[in-house]
Image: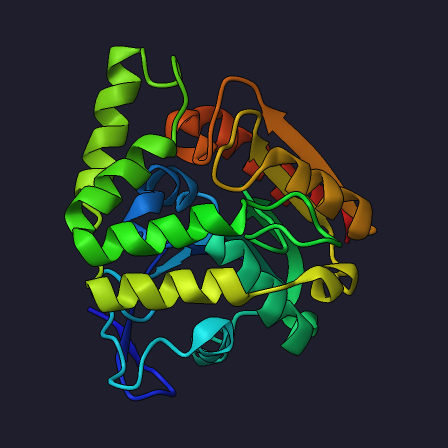
């Protein structure tokens, strides 16, 4: 299986399938590249699909000195882009992954043809100049739950990904459960480091520097990254379009994969028409 040597000394696992325009998927907090399997298999018939496990997640190791914050995680992505010589790239980032892409874009904009930011926010916690994040006390509560019992904390987090009725259809619920079961949970230390990265990150300025076409996809009832956060992004990113999925929470690509894949293909084909 392919690994990239992390700049911090660990191994970064990635999976590559298909051919054509490169399509890189970046997962969110306490997840892994396995969370994109409902996209990887169908889209590899059209594109060169790459999924990656962030350091300390999935099959990637965690450096002894820690996760390295947003800069360290984004640096690994840039190293992977360079290793695979990804050009004319479309990158899809979910939650934490969206913040990493905003950071990576500022350092390698020429590599990007477009971005898709899912359940995205430029700032996870609320601030006077950005009231669209979670209250700081709620994020601090997440930290306490991880320290007490990681498995229980992640189980609660998985439940908060979805809203009432979103998974009522039996096939949808079973499919989502199967995907989440394939995600290897990180260690408590990696989970805490990732949470600290989220709590400390502010991408307000980075968002305004994005010049490539950007698709924003958000669940209408997202309780983790609030929908108004992507509305702010839609106003800040000049060449952007926002799609809201009714009846969905923080992971619409899991509960509505067919629609998500169609929207992603439409975005990809629209980029081709611009050339």
What count of labels does the image hold? Answer: 0
Q: Is residue 149 left or right of residue 45?
A: left
Q: Residue visible at 49% across and 71% down? A: 70
What residue appears at the point 41 percent right and 22 percent down from the top-left corner? 163
Residue 235, x across and y down, in percent: 81, 45
- Tell me: residue 194, above or below residue 142: below
Residue extending farthest front:
137
- Residue 242 x/y as whole percent: 70, 35
Q: Is residue 68 left or right of residue 107?
A: left
- Quarter location, residue 131: top right
Is residue 212 visible in the rendered structure shown here? yes
Q: Is residue 80 visible?
A: no
Image location of residue 151, percent across then percent down: 16, 47
Q: Is residue 89 above or below residue 270?
A: below
Residue 45 place in picture, x, y as percent = 41, 43
Q: Viewer-proximal residue, 106 or 1?
A: 106
Q: Nearer the viewer, residue 118 or 156?
A: 156
Residue 60 figure quarter = bottom left
- Horizontal placement of 17 versus 223: left or right? left
Image quadrant occupied by the N terminus: bottom left
Residue located at (24% from left, 45% from top): 153
* Colour convention: rainbow
Q: Is residue 186 above or below residue 156?
A: below
């Amino acid at each position: 299986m392919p690994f990239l040597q992390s700049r911090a000394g660990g191994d970064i696992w990635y999976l590559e399938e298909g051919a054509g325009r490169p399509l890189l998927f970046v997962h969110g907090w306490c997840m892994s590249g396995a969370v994109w399997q409902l996209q990887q298999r169908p889209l590899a018939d059209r594109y060169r699909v790459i999924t990656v496990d962030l350091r300390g997640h999935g099959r990637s190791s965690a450096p002894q000195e820690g996760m390295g914050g947003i800069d360290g995680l984004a640096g690994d992505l840039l190293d992977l882009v360079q290793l695979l010589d990804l050009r004319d790239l479309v990158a899809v980032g979910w939650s934490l992954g969206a913040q990493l892409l905003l950071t990576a874009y500022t350092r390698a904009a020429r590599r990007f043809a477009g971005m898709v930011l899912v359940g995205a926010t430029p700032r996870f916690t609320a601030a006077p100049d950005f009231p669209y994040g979670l209250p700081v006390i709620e994020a601090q509560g997440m930290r306490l739950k991880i320290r007490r019992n990681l498995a229980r904390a992640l189980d609660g987090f998985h439940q908060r990904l979805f809203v009432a009725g979103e998974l009522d259809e039996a096939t949808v619920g079973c499919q989502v459960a199967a995907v989440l079961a394939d995600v290897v949970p990180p260690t408590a230390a990696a989970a805490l480091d990732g949470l600290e990265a989220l709590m400390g990150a502010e991408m307000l300025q980075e968002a305004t520097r994005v010049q490539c076409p950007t698709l924003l996809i958000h669940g209408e009832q997202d309780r983790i990254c609030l929908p108004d956060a992507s509305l702010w992004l839609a106003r800040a990113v000049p060449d952007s379009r926002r799609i809201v999925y009714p009846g969905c929470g923080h992971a619409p690509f899991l509960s509505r994969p067919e629609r998500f894949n169609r929207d992603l293909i439409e975005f990809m084909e629209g980029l081709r028409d611009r050339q």
